[in-house]
Image (cartoon, rainbow, N blue to C red):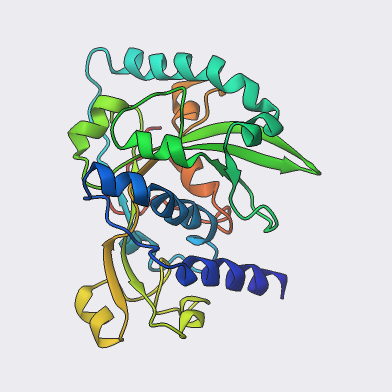
C-alpha cells in the first residue's frame, strides 16, 4: 500500500503541472523564463520515472549517449572537472548551506534512495556554459533527519549534440542520458500511468507518436534535457562517473539490470 501511495503522489505531481514539458529549443529569453519549469520536469523524472515493478519498456524510454573510444587527454579533462568540483561542493556537506544558497529539495517528504537538491538559476546557466562548481543538482542520501552529500548532477539542453556533451565531459569517461518517447495521459486519466501494465508515462507501453495519438495522449519525443551524475569522492574514475549508479540510484530501480538499455555500454 505504501508503494502504491508513493507511485500515485509522484505521478500526479509529474503530470499535473502546467507547462511541464517545455522545449529546450527556446531562445535566451524563453529559456530564462522557462528554466524553472524545465528543471521541475527534470527532477520529477528523477523522482518518479523509475518507480515501478517492471522494466519491460524502460529501454524505449531511455536514450544514452554513445560511449566513445578514449582519446589522449580525456581522462585528464574529466579529472579536472572533478578537481574543480570537490572543493566547491565541500560546504554542501552541510545540507543547510545548500538550502541557504538556493538549492531546493525535490519531494522532501517522499521516501527516496537519493534526493535531488536543485538550484534553478544554476540550471538555466547550464544551457549556456559549463561550470563544474555550479551543478544543477546536489545528490544526497537521507540518514534519519540528516542528509549525506554523495554527488552532483549536471544538465545540458536537449538540442546539444554528443560532440557538445563531449566538450563538457569526455564521452569516453561517462554517458549522459535523456528520457524519451513519453506519452502523457489525457487530463483526468493520470492514474493510467501507474502500475505494471501502464500505457502512459516513462514506464508505459506506448512509445510512438501514432500509438499515443490513438490513445488520446500527448506525445513527447524527448521529455527532458541531457543529464549526467558525478560522485566526486569515490576512488576511481569508473566509480566517479558510474553510469550504472546514476541509473540505479533512482527510487524503485535498485534491484534491476539496466545493461540492455539502448545505447548503453559497460565500461568494466
- Residue 179 image point, x, y percent: 35, 56
The one nearer the camera, 14 or 235, is 14
Quadrant (top left/top right/bottom left/bottom right) for the C terminus? top left
Identify which residue is drawn at 38% across, 82% down. Answer: 186
The one nearer the camera, 259 or 216, is 216
Identify which residue is drawn at 34% across, 44% down. Answer: 32
Quadrant (top left/top right/bottom left/bottom right) for the N terminus? bottom right
Q: Answer yes or no: is residue 115 visible.
A: no
Residue 109 versus residue 204 in the image, above or below: above
- Residue 70 image point, x, y percent: 25, 22
Left or right of 210 on screen, residue 21: right
Identify which residue is drawn at 28% across, 31% down. Answer: 171
Q: Using the rendered view, name the quadrant where residue 140 is placed.
A: top right
Residue 118 versus residue 134 in the image, above or below: below
- Residue 30 image point, x, y percent: 28, 49
- Residue 99 image point, x, y percent: 64, 36
Q: Using the rendered view, name the quadrant where residue 255 is placed.
A: bottom right
Identify which residue is drawn at 47% across, 47% down. Answer: 247
Q: Using the rendered view, name the quadrant where residue 251 is placed.
A: bottom right
* Residue projecting furthest to the right: 144
Q: Answer yes or no: is residue 179 visible.
A: yes
Residue 142 versus residue 57 in the image, above or below: above
The one nearer the camera, 188 or 176, is 188
Left or right of 182 on screen, residue 137: right
Amino acid at each position: 500500500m505504501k508503494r502504491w501511495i508513493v507511485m500515485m503522489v509522484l505521478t500526479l505531481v509529474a503530470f499535473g503541472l502546467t507547462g511541464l514539458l517545455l522545449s529546450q529549443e527556446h531562445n535566451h529569453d524563453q529559456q530564462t523564463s522557462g528554466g524553472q519549469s524545465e528543471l521541475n520536469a527534470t527532477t520529477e523524472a528523477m523522482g518518479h520515472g523509475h518507480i515501478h515493478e517492471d522494466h519491460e519498456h524502460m529501454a524505449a524510454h531511455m536514450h544514452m549517449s554513445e560511449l566513445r573510444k578514449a582519446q589522449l587527454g580525456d581522462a585528464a579533462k574529466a579529472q579536472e572537472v572533478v578537481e574543480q568540483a570537490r572543493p566547491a561542493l565541500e560546504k554542501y556537506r552541510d545540507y543547510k548551506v545548500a538550502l541557504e544558497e538556493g538549492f531546493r529539495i525535490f519531494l522532501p517528504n517522499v521516501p527516496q534512495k537519493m534526493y535531488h537538491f536543485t538550484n534553478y538559476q544554476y540550471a538555466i546557466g547550464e544551457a549556456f556554459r559549463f561550470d563544474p562548481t555550479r551543478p544543477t543538482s546536489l545528490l544526497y542520501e537521507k540518514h534519519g533527519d540528516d542528509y549525506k552529500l554523495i554527488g552532483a548532477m549536471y544538465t545540458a539542453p536537449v538540442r546539444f549534440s554528443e560532440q557538445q556533451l563531449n566538450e563538457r565531459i569526455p564521452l569516453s569517461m561517462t554517458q549522459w542520458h535523456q528520457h524519451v518517447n513519453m506519452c502523457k495521459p489525457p487530463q483526468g486519466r493520470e492514474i493510467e500511468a501507474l502500475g505494471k501494465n501502464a500505457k502512459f508515462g516513462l514506464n508505459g507501453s506506448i512509445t510512438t507518436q501514432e500509438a499515443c495519438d490513438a490513445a488520446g495522449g500527448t506525445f513527447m519525443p524527448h521529455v527532458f534535457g541531457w543529464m549526467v551524475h558525478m560522485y566526486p569522492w569515490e576512488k576511481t574514475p569508473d566509480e566517479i562517473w558510474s553510469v550504472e549508479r546514476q541509473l540505479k540510484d533512482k527510487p524503485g530501480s535498485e534491484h534491476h539490470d539496466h545493461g540492455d538499455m539502448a545505447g548503453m555500454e559497460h565500461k568494466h
